Structure formats: C-alpha cells, structure tokens
Image (cartoon, rainbow, N blue to C red):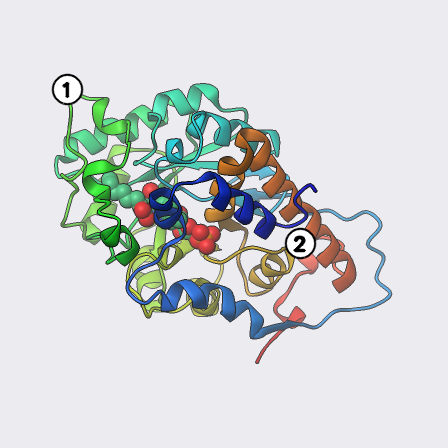
Amino acid sequence: MDPINVFDYEKLAREKLDQLAWDYYNGGSDDEVTLRANRSAFERIRIRPRMLVDTKNLDMRTTALGTPISMPVIVAPTAAHSMAHPDAEIATVQATGNCDTIFTASTAASRNVVEIAQAATGPIWFQLYTHRNLDFSRTLVQRAEQAGYRAIVFTVDMPQLGHRERDLRNNFDQLQQLPTANFQLSEGFLNPTERHKIDTWETVDWLKSVTSLPILLKGILTAEDALLALEHHVDGIIVSNHGGRQLDGVMAGIEALPEVVEAVAGRCEVYMDGGIRRGTDILKALALGARAVLVGRPVLWGLAANGAQGVRGVLEILRSELALAMTLAGCPNLASITPSLVKIL
Ligand SMILES: Cc1cc2nc3c(=O)[nH]c(=O)nc-3n(C[C@H](O)[C@H](O)[C@H](O)COP(=O)(O)O)c2cc1C
Ligand SMILES: CCCCCCC(=O)C(=O)O
C-alpha cells in the first residue's frame, strides 16, 4: 500500500537504513527528552475551528524572504543525504523544487554547494557552519551566493556537537565520518572537525560583511536572543532546537515560538522547526506566528524510502494534510490563520 502519512515513510526508511544511519537520523541527545517534546508539545495545542466558512478557493501560497513558495513548508538543512540514498542531495533538491518550495543545503551535505545549485529545480538556501578558518567560510558563502542561493541560514546552536548517545554506542564519530563534500572544495582537504568553535554575535556581523544575501539565524529559542538577532540586523529567525539533537531539556520549537514572535513583533520573519509531522502541526505553528515551518527527518525518510519520489511523496502528504486542516478549520488562506485558531492547554 502507498504511504498515507509521513509515519508510513518512517517505517519504510527503517527497513532500508542500516542501524548506524537510522540512529544518526532519528536520534536526539542525552535522554531524548527534547526530541520527544518536539512531538508531544503539539498535543497540548488544540484547534478552535470556525464553521460555515467558504474554503472552495483554498490558497496556501506564501513568500519566504520575498521568494514565492507554493506552501508554508521548507526543507530543513540536514547533513549527508548519501547515507539515505545514492542520489543524495541531488534527489532531495530536485524533488523539493518540483514541489515549488525551498531546499536548504547543509554545510555538511554529501554533495558540494555548487553541485546542489546546478541540480536545483527551485529556490535554494545555504546553511552555514563556520569553519575555524573563516577565510574558508567566506569562500563557501560567496560560492553559494554566486551559485544562486537566495539566503544564508546561519546555525547558531552548535558551538559543539550535542551528546548523541546512539551515535556513541555505534562508534559513529560524525565529525570524522560524515560524508561531507564542501570541506574538499577549497585549497586541498579541510578536515570537518576543524569547526569554528567560537561563534559569537560578532560572527553575525562578520557574515553580514561577506555577503549581501539575507541572513537567517537558526537555533534561536528565547526572546532575549531574538532581540539580539534584531540588533544585529538579521532578516529572519528559525526557532529550532536542532531536532532535539543539541541541548537536551530545552523547550520544544513550538513552545518557544510564541515568545520569539512576541519579541520580534513583525520586525523580521520568524520560522520554526522540530516535530512537524502532520498538516495540523503546520496549522498550529502558523497560528502561533510562524511564517512557514521547516521539516527535517520526514524528508530523510522519504529519500531513504524512495529517492526523489519519496521526498516528493512526503512533501505532497504534508501539503494535502494542511489543505484538509485549513478546510476543516475554516481557513481559506494563510492570513486567516491567527492566534485565535488555537488554545494552549
Ligand atoms: C540527521 C540530521 C542532520 C541534521 N543536520 C543539520 C545540519 O547539517 N545543519 C543544521 O542546521 N541542522 C541540521 N539538522 C537539524 C534540522 O535542520 C532541523 O532543525 C531538525 O531536523 C528539525 O526537526 P525534525 O527532524 O523533527 O523535523 C539535522 C537534523 C537531522 C535529523
Ligand atoms: C561539520 C560536521 C558537523 C555535522 C553536524 C550535522 C548536524 O547538524 C547534525 O545534527 O547531525
């Protein structure tokens, strides 16, 4: 039977992936409290649907930093897609473009920034982890800009890798063993373990000085940091706990979203990720002020299950679930999805 929800893709991925890849993809840090919270927090938010609303001409199109997208769903940056499928990021970027939305390429992708751009069939963003050698990072960012990426997503929640016990038990040292391609782009091979360990707010200023692309900070969870992000003139914030893979015990993305949205007060775009698995999850995130959501693992499950077709299958399921949720909640368009649509228990 064809998958009818993204959890069906998760089961198919489980059958295809070896234990090491499965654990790397699906695992979180420490006790995985935050990983579970990313899902369970959605259950504490209930929808207040409106009846007898004309939703015949349902419209879920929006823009992300000015780029038109067909639905408020964007593909999150995730490392090393070659562990899921030999077509790797080439399949993912093409399937995402064919769904008319944005693909975010990870610094730790298994294909390099230029190859991914050349294969793209739609808009792309580039996610940055800085390198100890900031000249290398500058070159990477500028290469992304030249290759046609439309924004830089600077991930700020990883001064160091989280304590991922599944990977430790599998003897999987990500920093040494992840199949990454960008680190081989420059003068000779640069070891991916040579991450820049001292990102500070000055790094945001540095980034602004080396690119004219809009900058989003990914990994913000508090009003305090959202205000600092505004002081440093970012264009967008992605409320995220890195899929429960960094500091265990932090708030779920959906729990942190309202305080960030309130602090930002419309001064930049706010996105969220973590645990989005259903159209109703997307509806709740939009009601709490996200402009769009990002999805991580479900895309990897689709890729593992059936390459580009699987990625497209996952994104189309999310689209049709969101359409149904909007119809049943009486929301003909995204503007009609407001905080009054939800009640937090
Ligand atoms: C296997 C895996 C690899 C990831 N790699 C990156 C990465 O390279 N850069 C990054 O900013 N976030 C990375 N993330 C975090 C995602 O961008 C995103 O925040 C998270 O997966 C969202 O949660 P979800 O998987 O529940 O949708 C990764 C997540 C996973 C599961
Ligand atoms: C440059 C090597 C670090 C890769 C980390 C990938 C990642 O973000 C993850 O969550 O895993």
Q: Name the residue at 67% across, 53% down.
A: 322
Q: Which residue is mark 1?
A: 187
Q: Is residue 170 left or right of residue 67?
A: left
Q: Name the residue at 15% across, 32% down.
A: 191
- Say if 89 sits above or below 104 in the image: above
Q: Is mark 1 within 8 Å of ligand 2?
A: no
Q: In the image, ligand 2 is in what quadrant?
A: top left
Does label 1 or label 2 sit earlier along the sequence? 1
Q: Is residue 269 left or right of residue 327?
A: left
* Residue type, label 1: Glu
Determine crowd level at label 1: few under 14, some 14-19, many 20+ residues with C-alpha closer than 10 A: few
| Mark 1 secondary-structure assignment | loop
Q: Name the residue at 85% across, 57% down.
A: 54
* Residue type, label 2: Leu
Q: Quadrant of residue 345?
A: bottom right
Determine crowd level at label 2: few under 14, some 14-19, many 20+ residues with C-alpha closer than 10 A: many
Task: Count all numbered tags in the image, as a single digit.
Answer: 2
User: Which one is in front, 127 or 194?
Assistant: 194
User: Which one is in front, 177 or 226?
Assistant: 177
Where residue 280 sits: x, y (%)? Answer: 64, 60
Q: Which residue is mark 2?
A: 334
Where residue 56 sits: x, y (%)? Answer: 84, 50
